[in-house]
Amino acid sequence: MHPKLKIINEYQDFEKKWEEKSKKSAQSHPLKTLKSLPKMEGIDPSTKKNLRLKAFKYLMKHDQYRLFSKYFLDKPFKYGYKLIRSYFTKQPYLRQDDFFLYGVKSMQEFISLLQDPERTFILGFSYCHKPFECPSGRFTDKCIHDPHHPVCSQCFIGKCCNFTSKANTKLLFIPTVHYIGEKMLEEVHNDPKKKITFLITACELSLEMFKDFGNMLRLQGIGVRLDGRICNTMKAFELSEKGIKPGLTVVLDKTQQKMLELLLERKTQN
Ligand code: SF4
């Protein structure tokens, strides 16, 4: 059998077994879920105003360990030039449904980057779509993704982590924007030749706020828009950054399917 076909068969097998286990776990350990999807604008109109300035101010004000300042001051011309260039670009990403493409011109280009085993793949998940019952805690950068655990087996994050190829892959569970920013900076600052492809879930507000910083680091990848009880105002965003997030976000079903297909593309090459 062709190796690619073998992996596709394995995927179908994985999907079937995962769904069976998930249904059983839902009967024995039902989770608190969203009963219906709230109708919320991705970003509240009042928050959209001067959002780039708000994002810059937020990052600097809450840079607790002075990491952003440290990296920025280390290469001020390089980062300053790229940041300003991004500020003058009207829309520095492409949007396709729930997928925000940064530094790539099409989904096909993203897939070709994913298929390059030399590139480090960063797969990240915002904490706000961890289940309330998450055994690793919601507002943490931990995730046990144990496929036999009754909660993990119902969790989309658990499904992705158990499915994705582990070769040259980093899994990140993201409590704050500073956390993900610092992880990305660590990767690229000390080794500028290192190539990174990312696939990260986040609220539309975060994806919009931090687009210029992604361009500053010349990152290439996709931000996946979350739905459900998202943060669409600065106030909600700031509370969420402190772990105050009573609502649950979700990756929509059709978007989940597409994300798994992208992970499959990576897997067929590793
Ligand atoms: S897979 Fe990770 S995020 Fe999901 S419930 Fe398990 S520990 Fe929590």
Image (tube, grey):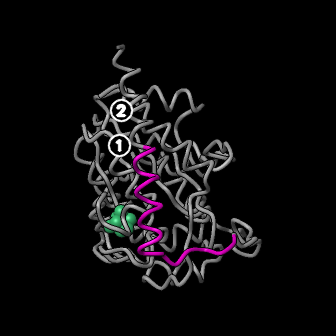
Whether pointer 2 and pointer 1 mark residues with C-beta atoms closer than 8 Å, the reply is yes
Which residue is nearer to you in this view: 250 or 139?
250
**Figure check: 245 above or below 72:** below
Q: Residues within 10 Å of mark 2 (few under 14, many from 20)?
A: many
Query: Is residue 78 in the magenta section?
Result: no
- Where disc 1 sits, the SS reads loop
Residue at the location (36% across, 44% down)?
163
Residue at the location (59% across, 47% down)?
100
Q: Where residue 78 appears, x then y in whole percent?
A: 39, 45
Q: Main secondary structure of the magenta part?
A: helix
Name the residue tied to disc 2. 267
Q: Is residue 63 left or right of residue 48?
A: left
Q: Mark 2 vs mark 1: which is more N-terminal?
A: 1
Q: Residue furthest top?
A: 1
Q: Amino acid at mark 2?
A: Lys
Report the span colored magenta. Answer: 15-36
Name the residue tied to disc 1. 164
Q: Where residue 149 appears, x then y in whole percent?
A: 30, 66
Q: Amino acid at mark 1?
A: Thr
Between the C-alphas of marks 2 and 1, the distance is 7 Å
Residue at the location (75% across, 76% down)?
46
- Where disc 2 sits, the SS reads helix
